[in-house]
């Protein structure tokens, strides 16, 4: 049984590549392979802020040497992302499905084995506590979420159990791989698997190792999440990467994934909205909230905003039309505003867009009065300031 993590495997792989490079250099120029070696090709990023949430520090791959090739794999082949930043909770017991139905914003009862639904978990004030994917497995419910949400979500569910027959458990050995790219389905077919339909998951095996495959809508290109036991993650990762395949298959880092996410206009929890946000502010209302289901914590706030008003702010997409890149946290200004005037929004994430000739794109949280699609607002990068019309996020809903 392989116990090395994918993180350690990638570091070791980068070290091997470095040694090979040094060996080649030494052969060409004897005696020259001394002194400071070149830097490792692998680069990791810390994911989120684990302080106070009980989660262990988490790092994800930023790039394995070439962001350009990783992004190209998404367009012409498959990129495989190690996803230690995702966590799993299992709710078991005869009342597990009914319990989760009365706690989240989307309908869970009536789903059959293998069906998947996305939803928010809110507090009593309607603020988002987690962005979840719930999968029915027999009578159990698997909850997929950001790893830093695990303790908070488990505690909220556990405190909501009164007479119900249900048990909440954090799945500490569950691991996630994510596959994205134009040829994901073709790659899975070599292992007698496929991309499930939206709202479905399926089970199968990769090189004899059991896996559960779930449809992912993070990007415009096809994508899946693969659930596997932590001890088998590297074996499945290696098997997928080494599949005999006519298209490029590469490890995928956050830099390339984020560029494709931005091009897909998809907001992300803890990045573009967070614990103080309301569902109507996220740009994800259509896929996360049912207005015909039964009660859940925070429902009055959601219903009142849906029928009687609008949010104070909302996530919007903007294509810069130039290579100037507004940074996350940067101000969004009204077009006629002075630099001393109060901002009307904030950039939440940004990236260069290869599909737009490396022109920049971003997501921003903008005040409602300025957020109508087509409204021009000002962005800044250094000393540069320019006007850009706002667009809807991917789901395209209006409040």
Image (cartoon, rainbow, N blue to C red):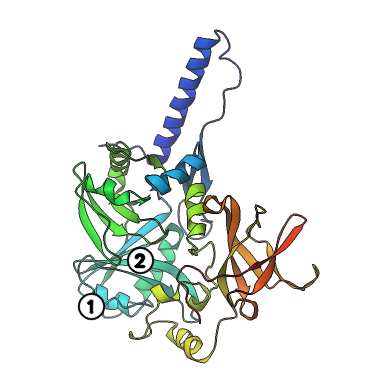
Judged from the image, the secondary structure of the residue bearing numbered disc 2 is: strand
Residue 29 in the image: state x and y as whole percent.
56, 10
Residue 79 in the image: state x and y as whole percent.
39, 46
Q: Give the vertical position of 129 relative to 67 (above or below).
A: below
Residue 38 in the image: state x and y as whole percent.
57, 26
Which residue is pictured at 29% across the width and 53% down the height? Answer: 227
Which residue is pictured at 45% across the width and 34% down the height? Answer: 11
Q: Is 162 left, or right, of 271 in this rendering?
A: left
Q: Give the vertical position of 164 relative to 258 (above or below).
A: below
* Front residue of this view, candidates 50 and 360: 360
* Residue that mark 2 sits on: 133
* Residue that mark 1 sits on: 110
Judged from the image, the secondary structure of the residue bearing numbered disc 1 is: loop
Query: Residue lying furthest top in this view?
Result: 30
The local crowd at label 2, few if under 14, some if 14 to 19, many if 20 or more residues have their Cα within 10 Å, is many
Badge number at residue 13: none
Residue 388 placement: quadrant: bottom right
Q: Which of marks 2 and 1 is nearer the N terminus?
A: 1
Q: Is 331 left, or right, of 341 in this rendering?
A: left
Which residue is pictured at 49% across the width and 10% down the height? Answer: 27
CA–CA distance between discs 2 and 1? 16 Å
* Front residue of this view, candidates 178 and 99: 178
Residue 304 in the image: state x and y as whole percent.
49, 89
Q: Are the residues flagged by discs 2 and 1 in contact, CB closer than 8 Å?
A: no
The local crowd at label 1, few if under 14, some if 14 to 19, many if 20 or more residues have their Cα within 10 Å, is few
Tally of numbered tags: 2
């Amino acid at each position: 049984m392989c116990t090395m993590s994918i993180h350690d495997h990638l570091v070791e792989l980068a070290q091997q590549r470095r040694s090979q490079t040094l060996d080649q250099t030494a052969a060409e120029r004897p005696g020259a392979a001394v002194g400071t070696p070149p830097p490792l090709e692998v680069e990791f990023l810390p994911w989120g802020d684990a302080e106070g949430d009980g989660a262990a520090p988490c790092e994800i791959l930023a790039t394995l040497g070439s962001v350009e090739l990783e992004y190209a794999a998404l367009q012409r082949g498959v990129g495989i992302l190690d996803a230690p930043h995702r966590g799993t909770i299992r709710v078991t017991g005869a009342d597990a499905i009914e319990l989760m139905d009365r706690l989240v914003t989307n309908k869970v009862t009536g789903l059959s084995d293998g069906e998947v639904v996305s939803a928010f978990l809110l507090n009593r004030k309607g603020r988002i506590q987690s962005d979840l994917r719930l999968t029915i497995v027999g009578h159990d419910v698997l909850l997929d979420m950001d790893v830093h949400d695990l303790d908070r979500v488990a505690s909220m569910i556990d405190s909501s159990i009164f007479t119900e027959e249900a048990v909440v458990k954090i799945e500490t050995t569950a691991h996630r791989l994510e596959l994205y790219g134009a040829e994901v389905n073709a790659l899975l077919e070599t292992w007698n698997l496929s991309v499930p339909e939206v709202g479905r998951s399926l089970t199968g095996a990769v090189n004899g190792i059991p896996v559960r495959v779930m449809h992912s809508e993070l990007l415009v290109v096809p994508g899946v999440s693969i659930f596997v036991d932590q001890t088998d993650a590297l074996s499945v990762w290696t098997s997928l990467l080494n599949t005999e395949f006519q298209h490029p298959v590469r490890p995928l880092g956050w830099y390339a994934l984020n560029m494709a996410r931005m091009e897909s206009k998809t907001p992300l929890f803890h990045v573009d909205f967070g614990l103080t946000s309301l569902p109507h502010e996220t740009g994800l209302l259509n896929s996360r909230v049912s207005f015909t289901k039964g009660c859940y914590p925070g429902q009055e706030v959601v219903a009142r905003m849906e029928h009687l008003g609008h949010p104070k702010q909302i996530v919007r997409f903007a294509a810069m039309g130039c290579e100037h890149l507004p940074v996350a946290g940067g101000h969004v200004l009204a077009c006629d505003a002075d630099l001393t005037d109060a901002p009307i929004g904030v950039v939440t994430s940004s990236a260069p867009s290869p599909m737009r000739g490396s022109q920049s794109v971003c997501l921003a949280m903008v005040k409602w009065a300025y957020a109508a699609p087509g409204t021009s607002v000002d962005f800044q990068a250094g000393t540069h300031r320019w006007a850009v019309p706002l667009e809807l996020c991917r789901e395209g809903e209006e409040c």
